[in-house]
Amino acid sequence: MKNTTKLFSLIFLTLTLGLMIASCKKDNNIKPTSLSESIIGTWILNSVTVDGNELIPTLMTSGTLTFNPDSTFVSVTNTFIGVQTTMQTYTVDETTKTLTTTKTNGIVYILSVQLNGNKITLSYTDEDGQFNVFKATKQ
């Protein structure tokens, strides 16, 4: 009888520990909460429009936007005449959900940002008064 009680206690203890370990929540799935953290990474362009005119696949075949943690930003677009790479710096305004980018030639753009999971929409008016919209999916 004493051995049976010990056996049941050992089984109960093993099951309890197993359930406790299995029910522990893993913290490695923590999602970034700020816009600054969320935009870091490479984004594949799905759509680029200028004043309502779609550029993919008319003038562009593909492109990526890469936001680095050091506040640098690289845009790579593949066109029918070659690859164009643009390097810029950026700052994020968490309150207004905007990005301010500065190209190497000094031109500054303020982009409105809409972020929905792994989808991003960036929109702005360029120096020629054209309204630009970039839609991308995080790689």
Image (tube, rainbow, N blue to C red):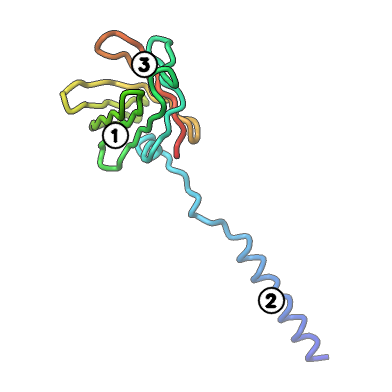
Task: Say what secondary structure mark 2 lies in.
Answer: helix
Report which residue position mark 3 lands on.
Answer: 132
Q: Given contact means CB atoms under 8 Å apart, are the residues at marks 2 and 3 in contact? A: no
Instruction: State the image quarter where residue 111 is shown.
Output: top left
Picture disc at residue 74: 1
Instruction: State the image quarter where residue 134 is shown.
Output: top left
Instruction: State the image quarter where residue 76 is shown.
Output: top left
Name the front one of labels 1 and 2: 1
Q: Amino acid at mark 1?
A: Val
Q: Amino acid at mark 2?
A: Leu
Q: Disc 2 to disc 3, how far (Cα)?
A: 63 Å
Q: Amino acid at mark 3?
A: Asn
Sequence order check, earlier mark of 2 and 3: 2
Q: Disc 1 to disc 2, how far (Cα)?
A: 56 Å
Instruction: Measuring from the top left, give residue 77's x and y in whole percent.
Output: 34, 28
Residue 135 shows in this picture: yes
Which residue appears farthest toward the front when viewing the image?
Answer: 81
Report which residue position mark 2 lands on.
Answer: 13
Sequence order check, earlier mark of 1 and 3: 1
Q: Who is closer to the viewer here, 12 or 75?
A: 75
Residue 95 shows in this picture: no
Task: Say what secondary structure mark 3 lies in.
Answer: strand
Above or below, 37 relative to 3: above
Above or below, 73 relative to 26: above
